[in-house]
Image (cartoon, helix red, strand yellow):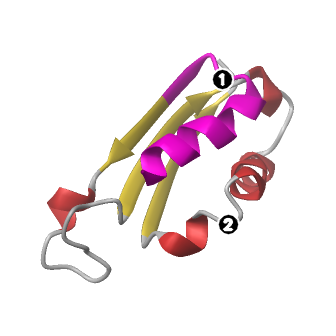
Amino acid sequence: MIADEITARLASLQPTRLEVIDESESHRGHAGFREGGESHFRLRISSPAFAGLSRLQRHRLVHQSLHDIVPRIHALALELSER
């Protein structure tokens, strides 16, 4: 499952909070929706790895961790904090 892959990859950031939310069902009938889900995700991550980084740098760090997963999904919303 993609959600499990995301969780495993983001463990490298040593998150103090990690929520991987599959929001696919709420996008039924919209572009990118796939039956069975795993097309639209929201990630809520708190990690000390984000300390001192700008919002853009935090997003880049997450995208680097998920570089080969992101092309397989339609949408990825990120909520990132250092605490």
Query: In the image, residue 33 lies at what x, y percent?
Result: 25, 74
The reply to whether residue 79 is visible in this rendering is no
Q: Is residue 67 above or below residue 10?
A: below
Residue at 60% in and 63% down: 69
State which quarter of the image contains the C terminus.
top right
The reply to whether residue 48 is visible in this rendering is yes
Q: Residues within 10 Å of mark 2 (few under 14, many from 20)?
A: few
Residue at the spot of label 1: 15
Query: In the image, residue 35 lies at what x, y percent?
Result: 19, 70
Residue at the spot of label 2: 68
Q: Is residue 11 left or right of residue 79?
A: right
The secondary element bearing badge 1 is classed as: loop
The CA span between labels 2 and 1 is: 20 Å
| Residue closer to the observer: 5 or 64 | 5
Extreme-front residue of the structure: 1
Q: Residues within 10 Å of mark 1 (few under 14, many from 20)?
A: some
Extreme-bottom residue of the structure: 31
Extreme-left residue of the structure: 29
Query: In the image, residue 68 lies at what x, y percent?
Result: 67, 66
Three-letter code for the amino acid on which mark 2 is drawn: Asp
Residue at 74% in and 45% down: 58
| Residue closer to the observer: 79 or 38 | 38
User: Residue 12 lies in magenta, yes or no?
Assistant: yes
Residue at 17% in and 59% down: 25
- Region rendered in magenta: 1-18
Q: Is residue 17 above or below residue 38?
A: above
Magenta stretch, main secondary structure, is helix
Three-letter code for the amino acid on which mark 1 is drawn: Pro
